[in-house]
Image (cartoon, rainbow, N blue to C red):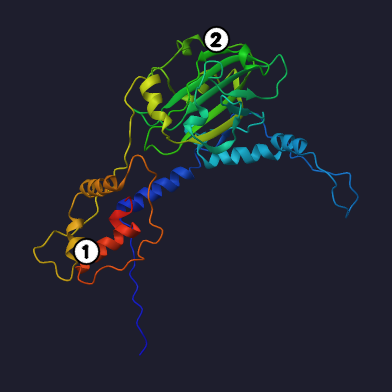
Amino acid sequence: MAALLSLRVLQITPALSRGMRDYRKAMHDPELPMINIGFPLPEDFQYKTNSAPGQPIKSLDVEKIRQHWHTTIGVRHIRNSAVHYGIYRDMFSNGFFYPTTHLQIFYCDENDVATPVFNGNHLKPSEVAMFSIMKSMPEIEFPSDPQSLWTLVATNLDCHFEQDSFEYLLWFVGNIRGNDISTGETICDYLQPFPAKGSGYQRVVFVLYKQDEKINYNSLKRQAPCLNLKARTFLTNDFYKEHQSHITPAGLGFCQVDWDESMKAFFHNVLKMREPMFEYDHAPQYIKPQVWNPHKKQFDTYLDKHRPMKELAEEVLLMRLQRTDPFLPPQTEQYPLVHSINNSTATWVKKQMRQQHMRWGKYRDL
């Protein structure tokens, strides 16, 4: 007898359906086209070799190829990467630009080991920390003629503690002569990125603007050292609209940072505040009302479903602390279930013991 296949049709609720329609309409709104606010895209570079047809290339100048990539097709690649990470959307609304100027950013530690900022790479706060007064800011390199004027602005797009749409200003240097940052006017001194615990990855963006004349930034100047986060509140879109007649975005570099242990000391010692922590507020899971005699239910699993999650986590944490020796490294069982459990032990206790040895279920953090 042929088995009957039953299908259950999943229907989208009307509220969710309306939300998806609005989202698609906003993403493909013909009234909001993306506008190029930067320099025009250079023509693609045609790679040619001096080798005869059919013969392998004997040698390649990797540095020369990298320079050509940054000035030709690499401009498109970096722009596409910025679109993917939502850089233009969150900074310039419906504006974008091609990073025609190759902006290089390096963080150097006390051993002069350089950590570069590429286009979305992951960095830790300890790698971008201000470990000394002499090297409290990243090193910036970009090609320029000696008479050009530039503005460099670094912001964090995702860490504002009060308003999601605002940014924190990490660094602002204006009226840079040529490519020497030391000749510029420091509008806001450098402050390292400070992702809070539980806030996830945050985008740190460096934008290089080319000026057509010297600009008076006195209205934006912060007193150094600026450790007041409210004073560092910033909106790139408002800044660009105010000065768009004299600046054009030309260079771009960005990375992603997330929390590490160094942030605790930074919040306490530098910002003089308690370290903020974030937790994801999960939607409550639906559980049927508890009954006196649940039919065909394992009583331990059934009761755990009706216990608060924090109570279960506290119980597991206490078990973990009982097994931990502060003077010895963590002990792990090489063969967790090599020894059999006594048959006289209750079935539910056996299951609990197996889960503890294997770190399954509620004991996964044991």
Q: Give the residue type at disc 2.
A: Asn
Q: Which residue is mark 2?
A: 216
In this view, the residue in front, 122 or 206, is 122
Instruction: Please indicate whether residue 301 sits to the left or right of residue 228 in the image.
Output: left
Q: Which residue is mark 1?
A: 349
- Residue 153 spot, x, y in % from top left: 54, 22
Q: Nearer the viewer, mark 2 or mark 1?
A: 1
Could you tell me which residue is drawn at 55 percent across and 38 percent down? 120
User: Circle 1: is it few (<14), some (14-19), or many (20+) Cα within 10 Å?
Assistant: few
Asked if 172 appears above or below 80 in the picture, the reply is above
- Residue 172 spot, x, y in % from top left: 52, 18
Q: Secondary structure at mark 2?
A: loop
Which residue ends up furthest to the left in the rendered image? 292
Q: Mark number for residue 104?
A: none
In this view, the residue in front, 360 or 147, is 360
How many numbered circles are shown?
2
Q: CA distance from mark 2 to mark 1?
A: 74 Å
Asked if 27 appears above or below 64 in the picture, the reply is below
- Residue 249 spot, x, y in % from top left: 60, 26
Instruction: Please indicate whether residue 337 sits to the left or right of residue 111 in the image.
Output: left
Asked if 354 appears above or below 344 in the picture, the reply is above
Could you tell me which residue is drawn at 34 percent across and 67 percent down? 9
